[in-house]
Image: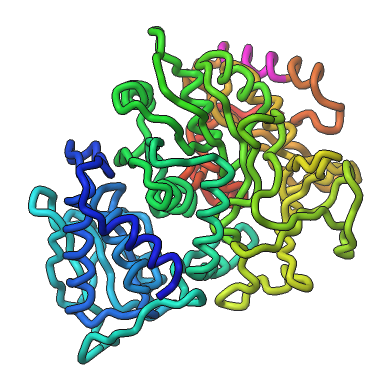
């Protein structure tokens, strides 16, 4: 049995009175004894259905206690999990089913996903709604086996966002996943006394590893929300006595701009920010407003979610922190190592980092055991890492190179800007021109007010950016293409319905 499976079993199959999980949607609290009973029920069910180590499971349950039990039982059994959006469109689900042979597919009763195979009903807890369980006919295990997962068994199988074309398949082993969990626990000093508020989507690697698994292995308590709610966030943090939360910069910005008018009494040790760069001005204002440390971090699916994080006792705003439990270096175009404070591409290797993609796409990103991430940045003399966007996102305006992230951070400092995406718009003379897509906090459509906002943006950028970095084209839009954590999908801008309100430039 793998160390991950053994660790989960030891932690979960212990009958005590301690609360382990609170499901806010179900309005139910589950103690360790109930978790142990339901987990064993699910393990037995998987075994009776002939599911075994190495089988692939597509899991499309919403954030819930059901997801928690099913996910952990699958890991202990040795199933390879592909977690997907519970509301995934039929065509996308069937595309995934065509790429990989899945032994089972689990979705909630109210899902719109359909499959021709017969289904069995899986009841995890009689007080909760049941879910459907489909066993695909292409897999036919006649009898349960005694096969158990090893360190090299695949635990998670996910696809990257595919920013450069066809998504790459990432397979994380039990050993890689456990290494990441241990790095997170050590870096954030997690203990059994901690309570985390899980409000990011569980089909994303961040919520699965950072919140669910790190909390479970460290013995802490989980408070699971069906999704993020700005109106409910602080009330839940207070009443549930939450000690830490993993969020995304988009959510942090929303919380800041919708701060409650009452005093907040919380027990937060820190809020963790990941998935996209966090503007320094936002971080400073957030810490001042809510009196809670913001721990900016950096990760990717290929590293089981975590690469760097700021130490709790010594944070540097603007930095994603120091490497935790892995090796990191900055490399030039020829992959030679660059000295401190010199900009280049970030390369990583470690026990939690994959060494190849499962579908062979992107395997040129590996060099002698190092994964060349595609992220641009530098490392200062103290080892802190600063990120300046992605190599493929760099805008080339007449030979002048600039990072869209830098421009976005400047624009987010404006109080009327809720969300922004900066990209290079093709230009026959300059090659590219800087173009900004902006969602306003008040979603105004008034022409006079939009003109005032436009002028304020121009003046703000003139005071804070070099001439070649200043946006020449400004779009006020109602929506931007974004992923599960709110990170804008820059490459989908041209195909997305932006619902443009006004256009300048």
Q: Is residue 467 magenta?
A: no
In the rendered structure, the answer to whether residue 60 lies left or right of residue 285 reads: left
Quadrant of the rendered image containing residue 198 = top left
Residue 330, position as x, y percentages in the image: 82, 53
Tell me: residue 342, above or below residue 330.
above
Residue 494 left/right relative to 143: right
Front in this rendered view, residue 216 or 504: 216
Q: What residue do we see at 44% from left, 18% from top?
A: 258
Q: Is residue 456 magenta?
A: yes
The quarter of the image holding the N terminus is bottom left
Percent from the top left, x then y, of residue 34? 17, 51
Res. 406 in view? yes
Q: Which residues are magenta?
A: 449-457
Q: Quadrant of residue 56?
A: bottom left
The answer to whether residue 291 is above or below residue 505 is: above
Residue 444 seen from this side? no
Q: Position of residue 421 (x, y in %)?
A: 62, 37
């Amino acid at each position: 049995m793998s160390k991950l499976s053994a660790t989960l079993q030891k932690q979960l199959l212990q009958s005590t009175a301690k609360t382990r999980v609170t499901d806010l949607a179900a309005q139910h609290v589950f103690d360790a004894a109930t978790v142990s009973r339901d987990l064993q029920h699910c393990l037995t069910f998987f075994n009776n259905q002939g599911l075994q180590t190495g089988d692939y499971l597509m899991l499309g349950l919403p954030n819930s206690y059901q997801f928690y039990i099913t996910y952990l039982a699958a890991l202990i059994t040795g199933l390879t999990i592909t977690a997907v959006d519970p509301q995934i469109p039929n065509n996308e689900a069937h595309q995934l089913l065509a790429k990989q042979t899945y032994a089972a597919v689990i979705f909630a009763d109210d899902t719109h996903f359909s499959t021709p195979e017969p289904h069995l009903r899986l009841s995890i807890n009689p007080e909760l709604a049941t879910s459907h369980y489909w066993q695909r006919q292409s897999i036919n295990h006649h009898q349960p086996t005694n096969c158990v997962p090893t360190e090299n068994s695949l635990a998670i199988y996910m696809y990257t966002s595919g920013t450069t074309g066809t998504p790459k398949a990432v397979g994380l082993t039990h050993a890689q996943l456990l290494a990441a969990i241990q790095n997170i626990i050590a870096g954030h000093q997690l203990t059994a006394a901690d309570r985390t508020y899980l409000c990011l989507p569980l089909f994303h690697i961040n919520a699965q590893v950072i919140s669910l698994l790190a909390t479970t292995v460290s013995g802490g308590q989980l408070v699971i929300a069906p999704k993020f709610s700005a109106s409910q966030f602080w009330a839940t943090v207070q009443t549930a006595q939450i000690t830490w939360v993993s969020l995304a910069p988009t959510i942090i910005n929303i919380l800041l701009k919708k701060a409650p008018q009452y005093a907040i009494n919380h027990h937060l040790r820190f809020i963790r920010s990941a998935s996209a760069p966090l503007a320094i001005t936002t971080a400073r204002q957030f810490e001042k407003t809510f009196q809670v440390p913001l721990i900016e971090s950096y990760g990717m699916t290929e590293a089981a979610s975590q690469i760097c994080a700021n130490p709790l006792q010594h944070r540097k705003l603007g930095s994603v922190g120091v490497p935790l439990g892995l090796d990191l270096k900055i490399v030039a175009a020829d992959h030679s190592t660059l000295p401190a404070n010199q900009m280049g591409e970030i390369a990583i290797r470690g026990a939690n980092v994959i060494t190849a993609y499962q579908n062979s796409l992107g395997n040129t990103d590996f060099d002698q055991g190092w994964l060349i991430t595609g992220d641009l940045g530098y490392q200062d003399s103290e080892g802190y890492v600063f990120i300046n966007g992605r190599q493929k996102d760099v805008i080339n305006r007449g030979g002048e190179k600039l990072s869209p992230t830098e421009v976005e951070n400047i624009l987010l400092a404006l109080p009327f800007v809720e969300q922004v995406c900066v990209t290079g718009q093709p230009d026959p003379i300059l090659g590219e021109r800087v173009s900004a897509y902006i969602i306003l906090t008040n979603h105004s459509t008034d022409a006079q007010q939009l003109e005032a906002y436009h002028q304020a943006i121009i003046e703000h950028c003139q005071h804070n950016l070099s001439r070649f970095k200043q946006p020449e084209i400004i779009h006020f839009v109602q929506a931007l293409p974004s992923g599960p954590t709110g990170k804008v999908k820059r490459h989908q801008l041209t195909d997305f319905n932006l619902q443009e309100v006004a256009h300048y430039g």
